[in-house]
Amino acid sequence: MKKPSIYSLTFDQLVEWVVNNKQKKFRAKQIWNWLYKQRVTSFDDMLNVNNECLQLLRDEYTMQSMEEEIRQESKDGTIKFLFKLEDGNLIETVLMKFSYGYSVCVTTQVGCNIGCSFCASGLLRKSRDLSAGEIVEQIVNVQRHLDSRENDDRVSHIVVMGIGEPFDNYDNTMDFLNIVNDQNGLSIGARHITVSTSGLVKRIYDFADENLQVNLAVSLHAPNNALRTQIMKINKAFPLEKLMPAIDYYLEKTNRRITFEYILLKDVNDHKKEALELVELLKNKRHLSYVNLIPYNPVDEHNQYNRSEKKAILDFYQILLENGIQCGVRVEQGTDIDAACGQLRSKQIRKEKKYA
């Protein structure tokens, strides 16, 4: 990236930049307001900021580190954006409409090194982390799309569950959370934000110590080591014997409910046996646990997996419920477009290579 994104700066960092550049401290509030309240697209639109400060901003930062490449709109209102970054890499961002408002799923890395065997995001290895600004800019771009409708719709919820492992890009993810949560900016409530991890144990401890009100989701997908290692290679480094104590620490430190993501794969992890094992795994933390059962979106490159039958999903759900485990089946969004995370990106990259 030729210049860093202005959206990478937290408010405190922006104040520091303003002061270090011998500008009046109040300029930081003005700039912040133009970025996140007015959502201008050029430094030139910051009408009450003096020319000297504007030139400094132009010299050091960019406001547009990505451009929209493709937009797919589903019949249910879900919109998937494919953004091209300054270095030519592609990322996905998804806008979803729910009864409680608009939620955006953001990407934190270009590609993914976790390598879950069912996931489209990991089809291409990670080439780099996104900066905090590139993550924030996804939200700003989606909010600008909502602004264009002129009906006061706003992004009210965020899930950090797009391409990549957020905790593998920990510092930038934490800055992102700080920026979008700022009450003088986008003001998205911490309790309306969920960060998902595949189970980077050290970072779960770190996240617990952050003392944030942000929600945590853990991609579990199997109740025992053998099966989890089979479908999630990260389990070799962080088996359940390491993961579960980290989760216990998080629960004790925060007293906040944790969500366990469990994608249901036909005849792999959707039997009564796995359901009962999951009950046993979570029995001592059931008061602060919620299991999100996810119907699988098939991916061409992972044709060894199929979606569980409806009866198997319902039976699995009933076993958890009858044993005191809070759970639900994820409502599907965007099934008539490239629904699986990373699918649109990998499809576009294959197309570009074909015609290169």
Image (cartoon, grey):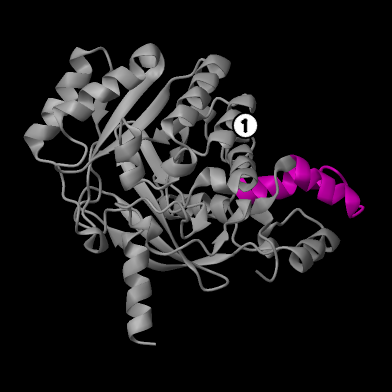
Of residues 112 and 14, the one drawn nearer to the viewer in this rendering: 112
Dividing the picture into quadrants, the one containing residue 266 is top left
Of residues 36 and 220, the one drawn nearer to the viewer in this rendering: 220
- Where does the image place residue 260, in percent across and percent down from the top left? 36, 30
Instruction: Judge from the rendering whether residue 37 lies leftward or rightward of residue 67; answer left or right.
Output: right
Residue 37 visible in the current orientation: no
**Location of the C terminus (image quadrant):** bottom left
Name the amino acid type tagged 1: Asp
Instruction: Judge from the rendering whether residue 77 lies leftward or rightward of residue 229; answer left or right.
Output: left
Few, some or many C-alpha atoms within 10 Å of disc 1 (few <14, some 14-19, many ≥20)? some
Query: Which range is magenta?
Result: 12-37
Residue 84 sits above or below residue 292 on the image = below
- Where does the image place residue 245, in percent across and percent down from the top left? 50, 23
Residue at (68, 56) in percent of width and height: 6
Residue 110 visible in the current orientation: yes
Residue at (65, 69) in percent of width and height: 1
Residue 99 sits above or below residue 42 on the image = above
* Residue 297 belongs to magenta span: no
* Residue 34 belongs to magenta span: yes
Instruction: Judge from the rendering whether residue 20 lies leftward or rightward of residue 308; answer left or right.
Output: right
The mark total stands at 1
Which residue position holds label 1?
206
Q: Secondary structure at mark 1?
A: helix
